[in-house]
Image: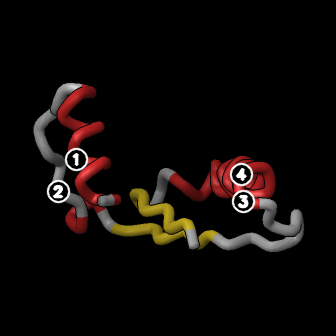
């Protein structure tokens, strides 16, 4: 299941296009049936987000690796 979090006003205009893109990637990478949409959108208010400081690409990759490990 793919979860997409975003500000309430931002994802709505793009939701259909994002859904198609996510679905196409899941069909190609995971052999999902084209009509199975295994993702959800979670629109949230601005105060629900914390905006961290920017990090280097290397630091972000290290974090992702550790999270999946």
Quarter of the image for residue 69 reads: bottom left
Q: Is mark 3 in CB contact (under 8 Å) with mark 2?
A: no
> Which type of secondary structure does the marked residue at label 2 adopt?
loop
> Which type of secondary structure does the marked residue at label 4 adopt?
helix
Position of residue 45 measured from the top left corner of the image (x, y, whole percent): 32, 67
Position of residue 28 measured from the top left corner of the image (x, y, whole percent): 79, 50
Q: Nearer the viewer, mark 2 or mark 1?
A: 1
Q: In the displayed structure, would residue 23 be above or below residue 53?
A: below
Q: Residue at x 23, y 40 (%)?
A: 62
Q: Nearer the viewer, mark 3 or mark 2?
A: 3
Residue 29: which numbered mark, if any? 4
Using the numbered discs, state the Cα–Cα distance from disc 3 to disc 2 in whole angstroms.
Answer: 32 Å
Which mark sits nearer the N-terminus, 1 or 3?
3
Q: In the displayed structure, would residue 56 be above or below residue 24?
A: above
Residue 30: which numbered mark, if any? 3
Q: Residue at x 67, y 53 (%)?
A: 22
Q: Which residue is mark 1?
A: 63
């Amino acid at each position: 299941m793919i979860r997409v979090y975003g500000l309430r006003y931002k994802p709505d205009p793009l939701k259909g296009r994002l859904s198609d893109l996510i679905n196409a990637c899941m069909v190609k990478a995971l052999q999902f049936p084209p009509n199975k949409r295994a993702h959800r959108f979670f629109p949230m208010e601005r105060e629900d987000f914390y905006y961290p400081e920017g990090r280097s690409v290397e630091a972000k990759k290290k974090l992702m690796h550790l999270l999946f490990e």
